[in-house]
Amino acid sequence: MPRAIGKNMSKARQENCKVSRKASSETSRKPPLNREKSHVYPNYSRIFYVLPSPFPVYAYSCLYNGKLEMKRIGMQTLQFASIVRTISQATNRSLAGTRVFVASDFQEVQPDNFEVAAAEWGLRLVHDEAESTSCPIILHATYAQVDGTSMAYSQTGMSFAQPVTAQENIDRARAGMPVVSYLSDELKKSGILRGERIAISLIIEPKTAVLALELQEAGADVAIYATAAEVNQDIANELSLHDIGVFANENWTPVQEHEAALALLDELKPTIIIDDGASFARLAQLERPELMKNIKGVAEETTSGIRAFEAMEKDGALTFPVIASNDSMLKTGFDNVHGTGESCVTTFLSIMGDSYVERNTGVAVIGFGPVGRGFARRMRTLGYRVVIVERNATVALTAQYEGFEIMPLADAVRSCNCVISATGVVHTIDLETLQSLSDGTVVGVIGGISNEIALDDLTALTHQHIAPSVPVTPLDLGNDSTALLLASGDGMNYTVSGGNPIEIMDLSFAVQLNAVQMLAENHEELGARVIRMDTTIDETIARSALYARGAQIDEPSEAEIDWTRTRFSDGLQREGAEH
């Protein structure tokens, strides 16, 4: 059994934690929260009531020992971390790229670092009151407005009015996805998807529900699958009411998940698959090969999935076209950097508390790809010391030039008390690395695939059970040390929070819709290979997104390049003109 976390605390800290213990015991009898609402708390001073004892005692003691500045009501002590954490987690909006009006009364009391931190985060601050009506977020000294809804500040953060039904959550997501709506209308007019049978293997939450419903309205038969850890049950139930085949349940075992995936294949006999991690398409090829004759192709949205399909292509095992939706700039440059990067940071803050930075010795981020980079930069904005672990020398050098410390993995885990994997590679944090962690080290995954942390090896050694979708689990390392595992080792933003922001998924799912259209129209010409989408598709989607957000840009120049024109010919031409 794991030893008691926090048993070596001072008496003063133990006294300060009594309130936390009491809160934990009082709320342990509460029924589990709906996952869609699990990131919304009626009182942020009791944000921990969904966490298993004894975690609140260890990780949140500072909330009761006088160190947390937000104990006092007022903007003078409201920190940037608290603002972005609360708005992001409560609304599932993207803060990066969003216009935020800063009212004059807010400016008088705003934290000293607010303007700089906001710029680094990607907020577009507006100070001209004439433009305030075009800003979805407005900050005042004592309250904020988000999409017209007012909420007062309190000593424990901000409170937000939330949708109360699954349908309202879906409607809110749809309202924030104008590009998907536009492209879906075009698909409906063309009729290209009529008769297609589309299997979706993605996290079941409001934004994915919008995608499924739009495909259905465009004429396709649609079914959706997800593992238990990736199911918002209310949304799944709502989709089933709309005649979407739902093969998922948040309480299923791995055996039941496997049976459900096969059942979807058998019943739907899909012609197109929208996949995540290449798992569903590979299952079809390995266990239902007779169905592969129906498959026109796969749209894959993850880096790990593209790697798997490329390996299949190299081995001659790929029998269908794969559209690499993941490689679109709108996926890697927005979904990964801003969507996953931002939402994982705000989820981390919701789990660990805004003031965790005060007792953190460093955050080791393994992998400086788009996800790792987006996460690392925002953690640094909040004041964290961030260390990058990266095997690719060019990428590591890039991180160094962006101001990050670079270390080998073994050195990084010794110098940091938080270790985050952002690679999408199995056993990035292997058993040896796990057992080298200091007692109390926080460990987690952003983005994420199964066993990116070697929990399979660890549980075989220690015989402990790791429940799915738990914000924090004390993790017995098998050597008298205990780590704190975030989100059961799955991607933290989608496991215990609302996933990537609505505006970001509008772009990603717009790419997926284009991929589906390509497969429906041209599958015979595409061939059995991994295919990168034309950059003109990104350009079209990006222009639609800019237009929907009220921005205007110049049209690209159509002038052709005269390759015969050089600096020498220009010089001779000028000299001739002078004479």
Image (spheres, rainbow, N blue to C red):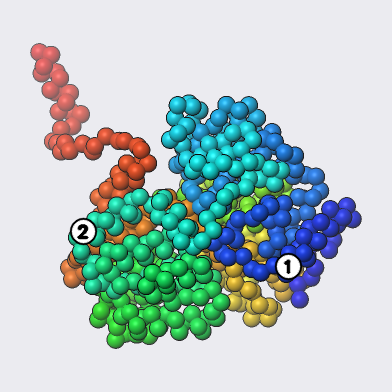
**Do callouts 2 and 1 mark residues in contact (Cβ within 8 Å)?**
no
Residue density around tag 1, few if under 14, some if 14–19, many if 20 or more, within 10 Å: some
Looking at the picture, how far across and down is residue 460, in whole percent?
Answer: 64, 81
Q: Quadrant of the C terminus?
A: top left
Vertical comparison of 483 with 268: above or below: above
Q: Is residue 561 visible?
A: no
- At label 1, the amino acid type is Ser
Residue at image position (48%, 80%) is: 257
Q: Which mark is residue 28?
A: 1
Q: Residue furthest right?
A: 11
Asked if residue 379 lies left or right of residue 329, the reply is right
Looking at the picture, how far across and down is residue 549, in whole percent?
Answer: 37, 41
Q: Which mark is residue 255?
A: none
For label 1, the SS is loop
Residue at image position (68%, 51%) is: 44
Residue at image position (40%, 83%) is: 262
- At label 2, the amino acid type is Lys
- Among numbered discs 2 and 1, the one appearing first in the sequence: 1
Looking at the picture, how far across and down is residue 491, in whole percent?
Answer: 54, 63
Vertical comparison of 83 with 484: above or below: above
Viewer-proximal residue, 209 or 537? 209
Viewer-proximal residue, 318 or 447? 447
Rendered image quadrant of residue 77 = top right
Residue at image position (38%, 80%) is: 264
For label 2, the SS is helix
Q: Residue furthest top?
A: 579
Looking at the picture, how far across and down is residue 115, in whole percent?
Answer: 56, 33
Q: Which residue is mark 2?
A: 189
Residue density around tag 2, few if under 14, some if 14–19, many if 20 or more, within 10 Å: few
Asked if residue 505 lies left or right of residue 359, the reply is left
